[in-house]
Amino acid sequence: MTAVGAIVGWAMRGQRSQGEKDAVSAGWQEQLNAQRAEHSRLTDQNKDLMKQVSQYQASNLDAKNRSKELSLALKEASAKRDALQREIKDIRANLETSMNEREQLQSNISVTDEHVADTLRKNARIAKLQLELEKWQNRLPPLIEKFRQRNDAANHLESELAEAHERIAELEEAFDPSQTRIEPVRDPDSLTNGRDASNQPIEAIEAIDENLEAQEPSNGSRDKLQDIKGVGPSIEKTLNEMGIFRFQQVAEMSEYDIDRVANRLKGFRSRIYREDWIGQARELRDQKDSG
């Protein structure tokens, strides 16, 4: 009985061990299937990303090729427009010459009635000039219309070229997010033009500029203007030379002050507004005062 019991126990133990092995194998199989499914999903996602990158590169290349084509077309249209302008100018000069000759011939006819032969020749000359004049007058409207059409086409090409440049800039900025995005000023009339911010004579303004540039804080206190985004060491040096040392001065800049800075830093007028130097200076001033 003992032997039989041992054999039965051994058999039951073997069955239990086999069941546990089957359960472990099933668990490992499920994990393998899950890993394979995740690997397949990642592979498909990688393929989609590569496809998107390829599409973007193709779009960028098409935009650049379109820009080159528009540039060439614009140059050709400009050359044709210049040629038409020169041709119209020559036609007008010939018309004026013909009219002057006609008037001169008519004047000669009125004072030389005694010379019939000369009068006949002059009349023939006048008739010939009239024919030439009519010929030029008939030829001029089509040339003017052709010039107008070419001018409209050139303007259209310039517009398309500007749009293509903007599109290329947007694509390049989207491809490299580390670059600073620069947008053109949509309403140039909102900004003042050069010295228009002041009604003083230029000599008086230059004298004011020299006095302001000569000023420097008496107590030696100055702020680090490079904390303003867009202001580097060379720009900070230029601002110091103009008498601007503190955030308070930048925060209270008037239109005239912006004109003065833009006059020293060529092309920086729109950048001062775009990067909001005044708003940044106010925040830095407030942080400094609260600290």
Image: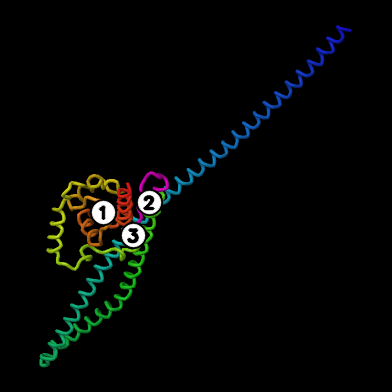
Q: Nearer the viewer, mark 1 or mark 2?
A: 1
Task: Name the foreground residue: 79 vs 71.
Answer: 71
In this picture, residue 8 sits left or right of residue 59: right
Give whichever of discs 2 and 3 has the lower sequence position. 2
| Mark 1 or mark 3, earlier in chain | 3
Mark-to-mark CA distance, 1 and 3: 26 Å
Please tell me whether the stretch drawn in magenta is mainly helix, strand or loop.
loop
- For badge 1, the amino acid type reads Gln
Instruction: Name the residue located 27 percent from the left edge and 80 percent from the top edge.
Output: 134
Q: Range of the magenta residues?
A: 172-185
Q: Which mark is residue 169?
A: 2
Q: Which mark is residue 248?
A: 1
* Mark 1 closeness class: few <14, some 14–19, many ≥20 residues within 10 Å: some
Q: Position of residue 229 (x, y in %)?
A: 31, 48
Q: Is residue 32 above or below residue 66?
A: above
| Residue 253 pos. (x, y %) | 25, 58
Spatial CA span between label 1 and label 2: 35 Å
Q: Helix or strand or loop: what does disc 1 sit on?
A: helix
For the residue marked with disc 3, what is the amino acid? Val
Q: At label 2, which amino acid type do we have?
A: Ala
Left or right: 54 in relation to 272: right
Tell me, for residue 131, which label it has, or none. none
Is disc 1 in contact with disc 3, using a CB cutoff of under 8 Å? no
Magenta-drawn stretch contains 88: no
Classed neighbour count for the residue bearing mark 2: other residues with Cα under 10 Å, few (<14), some (14–19), many (≥20): some
Q: Secondary structure at mark 2?
A: helix
Q: Residue at x 68, y 27 (%)?
A: 29
Cα gap from disc 2 to disc 3, whole angstroms: 15 Å
Label disc, if present, on residue 185 of the rendered structure: 3
First in residue order: circle 1 vs circle 2: 2
